[in-house]
Image: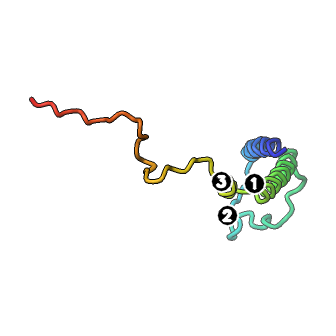
Amino acid sequence: MITLVTILHVLVSVFLILVILLQAGKGGGMGAAFGGAGAQTVFGGRGAQTLLGKVTSVSAGIFMITSVTLAYNASRSHSVVQREASAPAQQQPAAPGQSPLSPPPNAPESTPPAPQGK
């Protein structure tokens, strides 16, 4: 279930990026907010919403729903650290008097190679 929601979330996010990039700019930008030309339309109506605008709104809604669903599911699951701490240890304890880094008793002796003189 979560895999399906994750796949849907990624697909919707890519689709949302493409739809937003396809839309034409409305003009004005930040200059209109500071008294530039066309400042009267900052809070005014923009007319009917285009098809791309409606598709963007629906995609944004689906993106928000999948985001909330994934965040809720992530908050309910246990973290990896908690799972590792609660799992029983699988290692055998070392024999008394033996360091975990020392070689086993039946290991052959290793000697460093002799330096070669020139």
Circle 1 residue: 26
- Which residue is nearer to you in this view: 7 or 58? 7
Q: Nearer the viewer, mark 3 or mark 2?
A: 3
* Whether label 1 touches label 3, CB < 8 Å: no
Determine the CA span between mark 2 and mark 1: 11 Å
Q: Is the N terminus in the top left, top right, bottom left or bottom right quadrant?
A: top right
Image coordinates for residue 71, horizontal then vertical, percent: 77, 57
- Residue at (67%, 63%) from the top-left corner? 30
Q: Amino acid at mark 2?
A: Met
Q: Amino acid at mark 3?
A: Glu
Quarter of the figure with residue 37: bottom right
Determine the CA span between mark 3 and mark 2: 51 Å
Q: Identify the mark nearer the N-term, 3 or 2.
A: 2
Residue 84 marker: 3
Circle 2 residue: 30
Q: Is the C terminus in the top left, top right, bottom left or bottom right quadrant?
A: top left
* Whether label 3 touches label 2, CB < 8 Å: no
Q: SS of the residue at dot 3?
A: helix
